[in-house]
Image (cartoon, grey):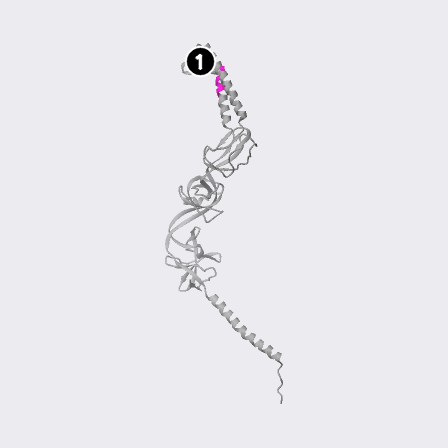
Amino acid sequence: MKQPRIPLILVIIVFAFIQSCTRSKPAETDAAEKRQYIQQQNPVEIMVLEKQPFKKELINNGKLAAVRKSELRFRVNEQLEKLNAKNGDRVRAGQLIASLKPFTYQQQLSGSRVQLQRARLELQNILIGQGYNTLDSTQIPLPIYEMACVKSGYSEALQQIQTAEFNLQATRLSAPFDGLLANLKYKAHEQVNTGEAFCMLIDDSEFEVEFRVVENEIESIRLNNEVQIIPFADNSKSFSGKVSEINPLIDENGMIGVKARLRNPGGLMEGMNVKVLVEKKMDGQLVVPKSAVVLRQNQEVLFTYTQGTAFWTYVQTVAENSSSYSVIAHPDKGGSLAPGDTVIISGNLNLAHESEVVVK
């Protein structure tokens, strides 16, 4: 009897189905085992608590201001003739920055000198009439000499020539100290008016920063306390300064003004926004990195480590600085924390109470 033939295409379909089932089962089994392995593994880093000094930091914001700066102004009106510097230039004390056209003031000085000569001749005539053939005031009685100076116009002529010399000198603007030029807006041949700010000169060798602290923090600050100043523009840089002034007045917001001074080693600028860190040393503190403290149920929690198990302990932060906390066990939560305890400082974000952990 002839055996019925199974169609070839049916054989291929059955074979492919068996192969796909065979492959999928190990893949699903592997994925499950991997999930189980990941769930069981909690790698952490630990440290042993010990009492140590802690540097508490009060963090405030402030702005840098040069200790010595000045708005320079011409004291006479005239057109700007020469401009010898530009914004950002460093100038030395006595260096000429700019000058106005001097012609008008040179003429005034020349006229004042002529007037002085006339007044001197008139003074001589008056004194001769009084019987004195000299202009030496030491040989003439003072009341007679003063009367002759006023009557001849000699005193007034002296004042006018002093004013003319002052005005001529005022057409030249020189730097009163070493520094950088800023806010210079004028160009040659523009009109400059008396009293208008022509430019600013900034001595950038030393700055001060003013910041404000709340009144219950002022006990942590004393004159000459060291502070750290960090520019907002580059928080990788830090500059040391000292508290130079404490204003003995609490304002309506309960704030007290404090100033600190620092030398400029380079890179600091007028008006720069900075953070000011005031440090206070506290002895005998339990210090942990900030990464060790996490939130659970809106409470600060620290995980201690005992033989592969993590136990959470409610804590309070006594003080902080940029990298660490000083902590104690929360007095109302019944926990404990003491030197010699081992605490978890990383890998704690997803831990629960009594989680099994593996030390890295």
- Which residue in the protein does label 1 denote? 144
Left or right: 339 in relation to 103: left
Secondary structure, magenta segment, majority class: helix
Horizontal and vertical percent position of residue 258? 44, 41
Q: Which residues are magenta?
A: 152-158
Tally of numbered tags:
1
In this rendered view, identify the residue nearer to me: 46 or 267: 267
* Residue at the limit of the structure toward the bottom, as seen here: 1
Horizontal and vertical percent position of residue 196? 54, 32
The residue positioned 51% from the left and 18% from the top of the image is 114
Q: Quadrant of the N terminus?
A: bottom right
Q: Quadrant of the C terminus?
A: bottom left
In this rendered view, identify the residue nearer to me: 212 or 250: 212
The residue positioned 56% from the left and 75% from the top of the image is 19
Residue 282 in the image: above or below residue 104: below
The residue positioned 49% from the left and 70% from the top of the image is 33
Q: Is residue 67 magenta?
A: no
Horizontal and vertical percent position of residue 283? 37, 50
Horizontal and vertical percent position of residue 15? 58, 78
Residue 115 in the image: above or below residue 277: above
Q: Is residue 154 magenta?
A: yes
